[in-house]
Structure formats: C-alpha cells, structure tokens
Amino acid sequence: MPHKFNPKFSIGERRRQKAKNLEIRVPRWWSKEVKTRVGILSCPNCHALYYDKHWHTWSNASVVLPEKTKVSEEICPACKTQTVKGGGKDSGYEGEVILSGLADTELKLEVIRTVKNIAERALLRNPEAQVIKIEDQGRVVRITTTKNQLAETIGKEVDSSHKGGELSIRFSEGNSPIRVYWKAKA
C-alpha cells in the first residue's frame, strides 16, 4: 500500500528503512560478549565435544567427525563449575536436592539408583547437565547438580516414583541455586 505523502514509498519499505537505520546506530551488545569458538573441542574430563555452537555427548562423535579432524582440548563449562566452590551460576552448582527421611537402607539405595538413572539420561541429552556430588549423611542424601532443571527433574521423578513423600521446590533469586526438598513418608 502506498504512503499518503509519497505514493511510490510503501509502508513495508519504510519499516525496512527504519530497521536498517537502527542497525547502524545501535550496536549489537551480544556480538561483543559472546566469543564464538572455532573448530572442534573435546573436554578431557567428561569427553564432551563442542561443535555446531554447543556441547554434545561423545556418542555422536563418529557420526559428525571425519577421520582426520583436528580436535583441540578444552574443559567444558560443566566441568569448570564442578571445580569451583560455593553456589550460583559462576561458582560450584546451580541445583541442590535434599532427600530426607530415608531410615530404611533399601529405600535409600533405591532412591540413589533412581537419581543415578536420571543423571545418566540427562547427560545423554545435554553433557552440561551433570550430578556433581551425592553425599550420604545418614537419613539424609544431598545431591548437587550443574543445572537447576536437573535438580528439579530429580525431585519430581523421586516424588512420583515413591508415593506419599512431600516435595518442596524453592526457586532462587539472582545467582543462588535452586533448592529441592523431598521428605519420605514416615
């Protein structure tokens, strides 16, 4: 549709011109902050591969990599967060799961097996989602994870597989980790 003052200039053309002017004036902030990695990287700790702009599990390597591909070594972000102490995005862990009321040793072993199975599934989908530590503290099991979604998934799966327990999820504000509490029925 032509513009009312200039019949040769359509509204769509005017919008494109405005967008073009904005691109010239406003710098793209993300282009300065995000460094794109070049080539293929391999994590020496967990053997994850970086290609196609994100990390993949090692099982996909034979499909993607030709035989004579040069692979550099670099520690992946998940392994970097495991070495730093504390809590939050840049330090240590993003998720914490506290499973309490585990008086029966068979129940405790079953819950720990469930957690390990969930962690293996998550690792196959995303190598950055890892369980950092499983601490057995008597009747309480404390689990720390590199991703908050993994902690939430562990809590929900344990709650659904062991009926009658109480699940409480406390989402974080800012950089503090998510806290998932599950108490077994008495």
Image: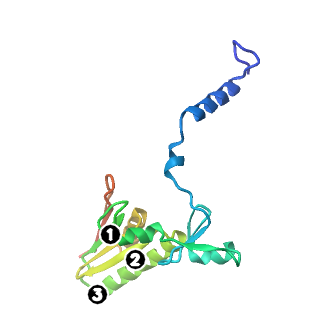
Q: Which mark is residue 23?
A: none
Tell me if residue 36 comes above or below residue 10 in the rendering: below
Of badges 3 and 2, the one in the foreground is 2
Residue 156 can be seen, yes or no: no
Residue 47: horizontal and vertical position, in percent?
Answer: 53, 77
| Precedes in sequence: disc 3 or disc 1 | 1
**Viewed as shown, does residue 186 lie left or right of 82?**
left
**Residue type at numbered disc 3:** Thr
| Precedes in sequence: disc 2 or disc 1 | 1
Label 1: which residue? 97
Residue 29: horizontal and vertical position, in percent?
Answer: 50, 43
**Residue type at numbered disc 1:** Val
Q: Quadrant of the C terminus?
A: bottom left
Tell me if residue 155 comes above or below residue 25 in the rendering: below
Tell me if residue 37 comes above or below residue 64 in the rendering: above
Label 2: which residue? 115
| Precedes in sequence: disc 3 or disc 2 | 3
Q: Quadrant of residue 176?
A: bottom left
Q: Residue furthest top?
A: 5
Q: Residue furthest bottom?
A: 106
Q: Quadrant of residue 36?
A: bottom right
Please give the name of the residue rendered at 31% of the width and 71% of the height, measured from the top-left corner: 164
